[in-house]
Image (cartoon, rainbow, N blue to C red):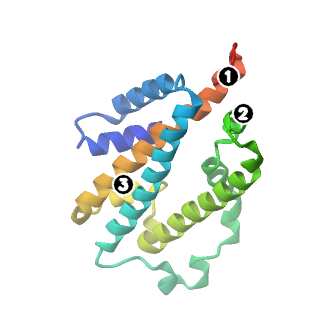
Amino acid sequence: IVMNGINISAVSGGHVGPETAAIMSCALAALMVFLPMRVYSYFSLVASIALALAGLAVVAAALTMEEWANPYNHLGEPALVQLQNIPRSIGIIVFCFAGHPCFPIVYECMKEPQYWMTSVYLTFCLAFMYYGGLGVFGYLVFGQDLQASVTQNVELLPQAWLFRQIAFLCFAVKIQFTAPMPLNAIMVALWRPEGPRE
């Protein structure tokens, strides 16, 4: 939600502060928890499309740069393989798959639960390729200056204003449309729903 506040603030051109945007994003996510899961699945589809568009916008923004960092050219193999950094990266890897609490709800709402394992394997593979690919790409482009969020680097590219805005907007949509899932899992754990399921 904090990252969403930053993205929304950037899209608004600073007219909405990141703190205000984060509060609004949190409130909207809390309201979206009450959407039926069948309806919410369409929001999830939009979030996935937004994530793909955001990645393309980041790549397009990087292509506007005259020169990339290309750390491999300067540092050789240590630029790409540093085994001591593996433990530090585990937190990021786990966070990108932070939807674990949502699995039971999603499984319960599936029309065809026999495809559960296939969908989980496919989704995790796609997420690994997306996040891993974007992370490696960001490192090749920005090198040691790569920020925790690549949008912070893209923000510094004045020649890529359109791509920057697209990336901010698409990441904001993705975060906004996926944030209610973990909140829904918490609500269901605390207050078990009564009555027939949709």
Residue 49: % across, % down: 45, 52
- CA separation, marks 3 and 1? 37 Å
Residue 108 higher or lower than 74, as above or below: above
Q: Which quadrant of the structure image shows residue 109?
A: top right
* Residue at which label 3 appears: 167
Q: Secondary structure at mark 1?
A: loop
Q: Nearer the viewer, mark 3 or mark 1?
A: 1
Residue type at mark 1 is: Arg
Q: Secondary structure at mark 3?
A: helix
Identify which residue is drawn at 48% across, 29% down.
29
Residue type at mark 2 is: Glu
Q: Which quadrant of the structure image shows residue 157?
A: bottom left
Asked if the residue at tag 2 contacts the one at tag 1, i.e. Cβ–Cβ closer than 8 Å, the answer is yes
- CA separation, marks 1 and 2? 9 Å
Crowd tier of the residue under label 3, counting other residues whose Cα lies within 10 Å: few below 14, some 14–19, many 20 or above: many
Q: Nearer the viewer, mark 3 or mark 2?
A: 2
Asked if the residue at tag 2 contacts the one at tag 3, i.e. Cβ–Cβ closer than 8 Å, the answer is no
First of labels 3, 2 by sequence position: 2
* Residue at which label 1 appears: 197
* Residue 87 visible in the current orientation: yes
Q: Residue furthest front?
A: 111
